[in-house]
């Protein structure tokens, strides 16, 4: 059983935060997620407290995070590390493959006869969500596996979704890349996340002398600490 994170864990730390399932509860569909005043104030306060050593690392695209928060003056890694926006607003992004158009078309055709499934188009990926139609999980995963084999794109699993995306990056590589920036250099990384897509960042944080914090129910993880849910995570961040 993992212990809760100590109150002083963020002293001298660089803080990396997942978004969905970590800062906000998972919504039935991605577009229903919202950032309230409490969360916006919390992130702004942490940026000041940590002297800018804070970043959001998400499977959502950078533009999606900015749409939720506004023009955040912090670093953001989106699309599982395939997009990295510095605190200065400069954006580096991998090239989008043409195969994604074919994948999106196949996913949309697949959902026509399976109500409740949702296709999410991303700059560098295509996700198929079955959170509101869990009976289609096996079919969705089989489709994603077939499309990955046909196109050579990376198959990414997550909570009640599958995604085909460009390979070569993950949340761990994003954390390592951000830790090489002047703002983060020399700090100990602390990553907070809930999903299996967050595990590479947990591993990277530990390897660089920091730690991961798992949000949610106990499960196999590289994290050193655990918080039970989003509410507990926000409470801890407000007092850490």
Image (cartoon, rainbow, N blue to C red):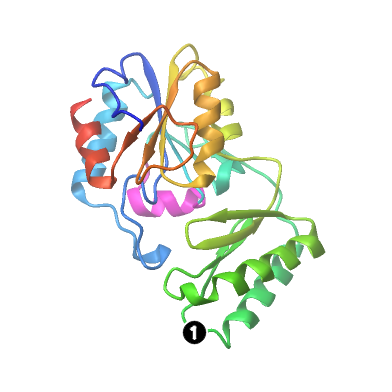
Q: Is residue 162 above or below residue 14?
A: below
Residue at the location (56% across, 49% down)? 79
Residue at the location (35% across, 33% down)? 1
Q: Quadrant of residue 153?
A: bottom right
Read off the residue under disc 1.
115
The region drawn magenta spans 60-72
| Direction from residue 139 to residue 87 in the image, left or right | left
Farthest residue, direction front: 1
> Residue 93 placed where, x, y %?
63, 44
> Residue 30 placed where, x, y %?
42, 63
Q: Quadrant of residue 13?
A: top left
Please tell me whether residue 238 belongs to the stretch shown in magenta.
no
Q: Which quadrant is the C terminus positioned in?
A: top left
Please tell me whether residue 70 belongs to the stretch shown in magenta.
yes
Magenta-highlighted stretch: main secondary structure? helix
Residue at the location (71% across, 41% down)? 168
Say what secondary structure mark 1 lies in. Answer: loop
| Direction from residue 143 to residue 44 in the image, left or right | left
> Residue 99 placed where, x, y %?
76, 64
Q: Is residue 4 above or below residue 18?
A: above
Q: How many marks?
A: 1
> Residue 16 placed where, x, y %?
42, 32
């Amino acid at each position: 059983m993992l212990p809760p994170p100590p109150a002083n864990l963020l002293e001298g730390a660089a803080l990396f935060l997942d978004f969905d399932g970590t800062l906000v509860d998972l919504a039935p569909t991605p577009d229903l997620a919202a950032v309230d005043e409490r969360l916006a104030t919390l992130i702004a306060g942490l940026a000041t407290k940590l002297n800018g050593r804070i970043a959001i690392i998400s499977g959502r695209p950078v533009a999606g995070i900015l749409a939720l928060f506004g023009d955040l003056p912090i670093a953001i890694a989106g699309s599982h590390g395939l997009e990295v926006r510095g605190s200065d607003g400069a954006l580096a992004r991998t090239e989008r493959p043409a195969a994604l158009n074919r994948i999106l078309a196949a996913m949309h055709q697949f959902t026509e006869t399976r109500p409740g499934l949702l296709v999410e188009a991303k700059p560098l990926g295509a996700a198929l969500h079955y959170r509101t139609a869990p009976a289609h999980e096996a079919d969705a995963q089989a489709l994603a596996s077939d499309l990955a084999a046909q196109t050579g794109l990376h198959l990414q699993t997550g909570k009640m979704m599958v995604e085909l995306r460009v390979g070569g990056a993950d949340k761990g590589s994003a954390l390592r890349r951000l830790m090489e920036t002047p703002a983060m250099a020399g700090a100990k990384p602390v990553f907070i996340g809930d999903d299996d897509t967050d595990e590479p960042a947990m591993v990277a944080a530990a390897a660089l002398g920091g730690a991961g914090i798992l949000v949610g129910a106990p499960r196999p993880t590289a994290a050193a600490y655990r918080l039970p849910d989003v509410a507990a995570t926000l409470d801890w961040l407000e007092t850490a």
